[in-house]
Image (cartoon, rainbow, N blue to C red):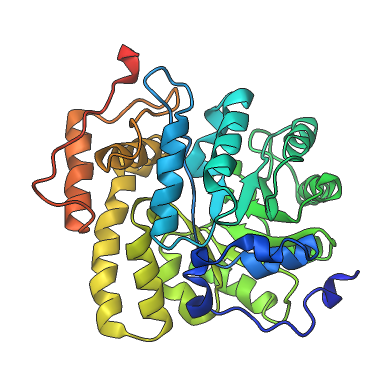
């Protein structure tokens, strides 16, 4: 079936209709084709799930269960696994596999799932795809290679080979900062012609580029533009973005969902009030001058303060210091996520493990 015929006659999803799609069981649509299932379910707000570790740096399976309940009860639309927020590039293959298994078991079909298979090696990516054969993700994603610099022709070839190998609909994960690869609009247009490439997650944090993507694919129901920017929920609903993958919904899914709904319906007063809280929340990711180390440490610390994880960071990322922990706690209080009198959780030091 050609890509143009995939979605004929299907009413487009709107942000109001999908923000709370966690209330429906995605198994209702698993009997249709995989690409159709992807477009039906890949909408709304998807938290980028972490890889919770215990004091011995092993996967914390119970924390996976708590995290699924936390985001699902908070109104998340799906689970985005093994992305940047999971620290995938720092994990052993066995830990990645264990985390995917734990999340699928904890989720038990409650929310749709999209899984990352990223690696520099196409052979490893094929192995990652094969390891998913017993699960039911609605799609998979991968970044461009992130060590050597490649030209556009190499990158197009790389993504096409992943799409050819994948039994699941494939999403391009565009993270220019971490991969040193910029995907121009013509390159994305070319890749979008592949029958199994169904979308792009735009994590450039460049609003102008995101708007160009939306304009380019405005009439394409067979290609989804996904926002990978935490600030995307502030303007995205108003400009046509249907899907948001972000870090903040992991911490406060109800706050982010309420903000997106307020923006979508044009409730300016509520949008402004919630946007202020949202801005305070995003401060937890600003540790260490906004480095990836600060992002992972801030996220782990916030989850520990909420009692969801042990707060252990993947090596070589060091855990938050006492001063950094207090900064994160203060940001959570300012965002209304925790109460001022809430006791601070003990954050383990990786060096003491």
Q: Locate residue 320, reporting x and y percent.
A: 28, 31
Mark count? 0
Q: Residue furthest left?
A: 341
Quarter the N terminus occupies: bottom right
Residue most extreme to the right: 1
Query: With respect to residue 224, does 344 lie above or below?
Result: above
The x and y percentages for residue 169 are 75, 56
| Vertical side of 14 occupied by 126: above or below | above
Q: Nearer the viewer, residue 171 or 249?
A: 249
Q: Position of residue 214 (x, y in %)?
A: 61, 75
Residue most extreme to the top: 352
Q: Is residue 348 left or right of residue 214?
A: left
Residue 92 vs residue 137, the one in the foreground: 137
Measured as percent of width and height from the top left, residue 57 is found at 44, 21
Quadrant of residue 226 within the rendered picture: bottom right
At 77% across and 77% down in the image, what residue appears? 7
Residue displayed at 40% across by 37% down: 296
Q: Is residue 136 above or below residue 194?
A: above
Query: Is any part of residue 140 visible from this angle?
Result: yes
| Closer-to-camera residue (196/317) | 196
Please state if 274 lies on the left or on the right of 147 as rendered.
left
User: Would residue 291 appear left or right of 217 to someone viewing this image?
Assistant: left
**Image height check: is 152 above or below 127?**
below
Quarter of the picture containing the C terminus is: top left
Quarter location, residue 118 = top right
Query: Residue at position x 21%, y 28% from top?
Result: 346
Q: Quadrant of residue 4?
A: bottom right
In this rendering, does residue 186 appear at all? no
- Using residue 196 as the reference point, say whether residue 302 is left or right of it: left
| Residue appearing at x 29%, y 47% in the figure | 284
């Amino acid at each position: 079936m050609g890509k143009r015929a995939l979605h004929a006659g299907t009413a487009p999803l709107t942000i109001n209709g999908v923000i709370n799609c966690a209330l429906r069981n995605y198994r209702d649509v698993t009997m249709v084709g995989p690409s159709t299932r992807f477009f039906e379910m890949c909408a709304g707000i998807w938290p980028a799930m972490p890889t919770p570790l215990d004091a011995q740096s092993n996967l914390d399976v119970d924390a996976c269960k708590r995290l699924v309940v936390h985001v699902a009860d908070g109104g998340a639309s799906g689970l985005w696994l093994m992305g940047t927020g999971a620290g995938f590039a720092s994990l052993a293959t066995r830990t990645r596999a264990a985390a995917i298994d734990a999340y699928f078991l904890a989720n038990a079909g409650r929310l749709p799932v999209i899984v990352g298979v990223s690696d520099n090696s196409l052979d490893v990516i094929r192995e990652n795809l094969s390891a998913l054969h017993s699960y039911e993700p609605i799609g998979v994603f991968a970044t461009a290679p992130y060590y050597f610099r490649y030209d556009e022709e190499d990158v197009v070839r790389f993504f096409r080979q992943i799409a050819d190998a994948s039994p699941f609909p494939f999403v391009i994960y565009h993270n220019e900062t971490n991969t040193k690869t910029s995907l121009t609009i013509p390159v994305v247009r070319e890749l979008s012609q592949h029958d199994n490439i169904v979308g792009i997650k735009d994590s450039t944090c460049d609003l102008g580029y995101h708007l160009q993507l939306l304009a380019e694919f405005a009439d394409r129901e067979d290609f989804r533009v996904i926002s990978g920017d935490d600030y995307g929920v502030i303007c995205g609903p108003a400009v046509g973005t249907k899907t948001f993958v972000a870090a903040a919904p992991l911490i406060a899914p109800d706050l982010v969902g309420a903000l997106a709904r307020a923006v979508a319906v044009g409730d300016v007063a509520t949008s402004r009030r919630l946007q202020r809280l949202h801005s305070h929340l995003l401060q937890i990711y600003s540790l260490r001058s906004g480095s990836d180390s600060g992002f992972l440490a801030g996220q782990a610390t916030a989850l520990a303060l909420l009692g969801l994880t042990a707060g252990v960071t993947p090596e070589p990322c060091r855990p938050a210091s006492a001063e950094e922990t207090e900064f994160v706690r203060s940001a959570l209080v300012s965002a209304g996520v925790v109460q001022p009198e809430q006791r601070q959780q003990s954050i383990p030091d990786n060096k003491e493990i």
